[in-house]
Image (spheres, rainbow, N blue to C red):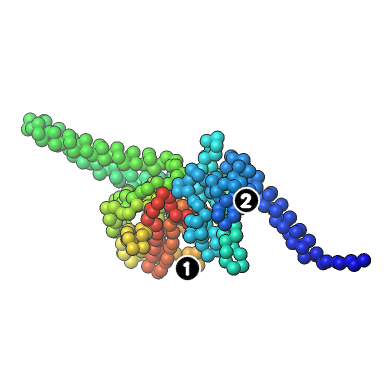
Amino acid sequence: MITVSLDITERKEAEDQLHKLSSAVAQSPNAVLIADPDGTVEYVNSRVGDITGVNGEDYIGDDLFAWQRDASPPQNHEQILSEANQDGSSQREIQLRRTDGSAFWCRSMTSVIRSSDGEVTHFLTIIDDISDQKQVEAQLIQTSKLATLGQMAAGMAHELNQPLYIIRMAADRCLMEMDAGTLEPETGREHFEIIVGQCQRMADIIGHLRIFGRRDALEPSLMDPAASIHRAVEMMLEQYRLEDIEINAAIPPTANPVFGHPIRLEQVMVNLLSNAHDAILDRLAADADGAKGSITVALVDDEQAETICVTVNDNGGGIPEDKLDSIFEPFFTTKEVGQGMGLGLSVSQSIISEMGGELAATTSGEGTSFSITLPYAIGDEPSPS
């Protein structure tokens, strides 16, 4: 009798590791789908059904991205191969609807799994329900927006004062000519047209502020960034001038469209202008050199790079170098106690990031420079950050 003994220790260890991995995937709080090289689903865990509202088993044999058919634009495995970054994965945040009609936000990351010789063996998609996170972010942005409205209040007063002054002048002129018996019908009509026009201007200002204060939709839309930059500058221009701070703006009438929320971009701009304003006032209070405050706002539409770049420069003395890396952290502020919540720049960075862009800052002894870079709107949604 011949007895053959084989050492299967390594195989047992491999099976044990595979069992642990399989259990971890099955019990993962995230949805997991695995597809073959053609993008056909071979495996799903139970969380797929919990998140999408469809029985996960129904996706077996279907396309890897069948669960996001109502996304705009839909994905496919060939697109993932072309978009995958250096670590072989592609990530996106999308809003979808379950079969019961309820909306949800999710973050999906699809990785390309290759063999040692570089051949694609599988696609792995991990889906995370981020609906609660999106709601918290929206509430934080809304809170910051209401604080920004407070910063805009003084500017609004100045914006309303000018049309009120013109209305008063036109009405007084009418009364004087009526009392003197010299009011001609045509002249009276001109005065009343001025009054009507200025009333409409005031209504537009107030209406815009009402829109600004509303809770906006989570879904971004196609927008002209130049319009938002113009509105933010115009709202603060007169107030700052009276405080001896000049805003020099170089903004084209229109710019190539980007994806985002017009009011949110305006919120970012008002925050940057307000920070520059406060820094300049602090410098003027500490420095009796008589130098005027200056803020420069510029928008460059770079068609070659397909980006919009907005810069806000001030001569407020700059941010200390050792604090520059911390300014985008929540609740960090360089202002005195009680003068700021430390949320403005953190929320602003979040807004720009959602638009697929970048908010950065540099500083010098002269002042601080903030730059916003936004990609052109190409396709049906913003590029993921």
User: Could you say whether the residue bearing mark 2 is in a helix, strand or loop?
Assistant: strand
Across and down, in percent, residue 320 comes to 46, 66
CA gap between label 2 and label 1 equals 53 Å
Q: Residue at x 21, y 41 (%)?
A: 166
Residue 367, picture quadrant: bottom left
Q: Position of residue 355 (x, y in %)?
A: 43, 53
- State the residue position of label 2: 42
Image side of residue 246 versus residue 265, left or right = left
- How many C-alpha atoms fall within 10 Å of the one at disc 2: few (<14), some, or many (≥20)? some
**Of residues 303 and 16, which is closer to you in this image?**
16
The residue under label 1 is 321
Q: Residue at x 58, y 39 (%)?
A: 53
Residue displayed at 29% across by 56% down: 251
What kind of residue is marked 1? Glu
17 and 141: which one is in front? 17
Q: Residue furthest front?
A: 1
Q: Position of residue 158 (x, y in %)?
A: 30, 46
Element marked by disc 1? helix
Q: Quadrant of the N terminus?
A: bottom right
On the image, the x and y values in percent for residue 214 come to 42, 40
Name the amino acid type tagged 2. Glu
In the rendered structure, find residue 332 and report the number of the disc placed on it.
Answer: none
